[in-house]
Amino acid sequence: MSLSPRLEALIDAFCCLPGVGRKSAQRMAFHLLERDRDGAAHLSAMLGDALEHIGRCELCQTFSETDRCPVCQDHTRNPELLCVVESPADLVAIEQSGDFSGYYFVLLGHLSPIDGIGPEDIGVDRLLEQIRQRGVRELIMATNATVEGDATAHYIADRVDESVVTITRPAQGLPVGGELGVVDGGTLSHALRGRRPLTGQFE
Amino acid sequence: MSLSPRLEALIDAFCCLPGVGRKSAQRMAFHLLERDRDGAAHLSAMLGDALEHIGRCELCQTFSETDRCPVCQDHTRNPELLCVVESPADLVAIEQSGDFSGYYFVLLGHLSPIDGIGPEDIGVDRLLEQIRQRGVRELIMATNATVEGDATAHYIADRVDESVVTITRPAQGLPVGGELGVVDGGTLSHALRGRRPLTGQFE
């Protein structure tokens, strides 16, 4: 027996969510229709609403309902610090750490020649323009600690005038609370190579 | 920093999905807005469409776009066999096994006095009426093999006139391909108590 066509269509539509395969999609569709029709109507409405109203900030490219996002509108921040991240989720994570007071620039992903994603797709020219306009002194390349993230960071660093701007990258090493025995080799070598004097590390 | 209000609302809306917490909901919202706006629009539309058009079959209570579902409309089936399941997903699973040729009745869950779900909520009266109307001879109680599923099966069995209808329950035992050493004790005792002569079991 096949399911009703609309139910099939709904299950297929759920498969566009990350990490959701056919089985989970079916469970979601059945759950909503069986037990939470109000939640389903709300989700449908919120999706439509978000698509209609959420665009990107004209300065930093993060998600925003207004031309400029709340961070870019906040004039108490330090314009000499600019943090480059791959996605709006990374921006949120850094903001939640509460340890950064500068502005951001959100690339639209990372360089990936194999997928046809080049410098213009991640907005490198707009980033360079912002560095000039804001008078940035330090550029923190907080792209992911992956091969693609590293490559993107190095490409951008090559395009920036290093006589004016210092370029940094977040430290790689042991996670807080991490046990040495369970940390992978690559992280451990980074942690050892990046070792700092004991007296200085709690400053 | 808080996210934009519409983004927060969208993330909250995703939390209504089963097995989706705040972190996954955020990942879903960001993924759709960043990479799959078409998929998001499609999901929103399909949800609205499903809510508007998918109701329940007037006979068996499963999801259906028409008054009667395709199974109930199929007059080549055996009306003497009626299989009672907890949800439309169970009906689909049994149909996919291809081993059942009768009709179904889908309860709207299972009896759960603690949640205020009584016999009228799972449609027991409608089930009894169907048993009479269809001239059912065997009622297969395929509710889940859980405490609630067992209790529901026993409650319904008590309400059915057993001089007219035989009541059965699917066998409990080892899953096909299962290894004895990894099967839990409860399943193993069911498998042993329900043992059958070797000559008969492949019939």
Image (cartoon, coloured by chain):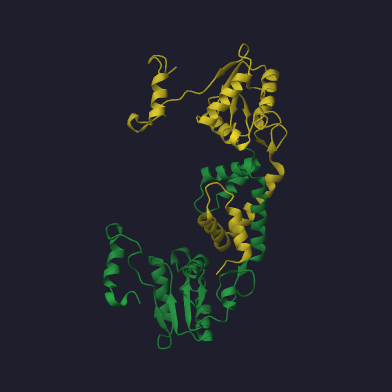
Chain colours: A green, B yellow
Q: Quadrant of the N terminus of chain B?
A: bottom right
Q: Quadrant of the C terminus of chain B?
A: top left
Is residue B142 something one can see in this rendering? no
- The residue depicted at 39 percent of the width and 75 percent of the height is A169
Location of residue A126 in the rendering, given as x and y in whole percent from the top left corner:
53, 78
> Relative to A92, is B193 on the left or the right?
left
Seen from the viewer's position, the closer of residues B158 and A67 is: B158
Seen from the viewer's position, the closer of residues A90 and A14 is: A90
Q: Is residue A170 above or below residue A41?
A: below
Which quadrant would residue B109 be assigned to in this image?
Answer: top right
Q: Is residue A161 above or below residue A59?
A: below
Location of residue A42 in the rendering, given as x and y in whole percent from the top left corner:
66, 52
| Farthest residue, direction bottom | A163
Q: Is residue A8 above or below residue A101?
A: above
Location of residue B38 in the rendering, given as x and y in whole percent from the top left corner:
61, 58
> Relative to B103, is A186 on the left or the right?
left
- The residue depicted at 36 percent of the width and 64 percent of the height is A176
| Farthest residue, direction front | B114
- The residue depicted at 39 percent of the width and 73 percent of the height is A170
Location of residue A193 in the rendering, given as x and y in whole percent from the top left corner:
27, 72
Is residue A53 something one can see in this rendering? yes
Q: Is residue A144 above or below residue A159?
A: above
User: How many numbered marks appear?
Assistant: 0
Seen from the viewer's position, the closer of residues B104 and B203 is: B104
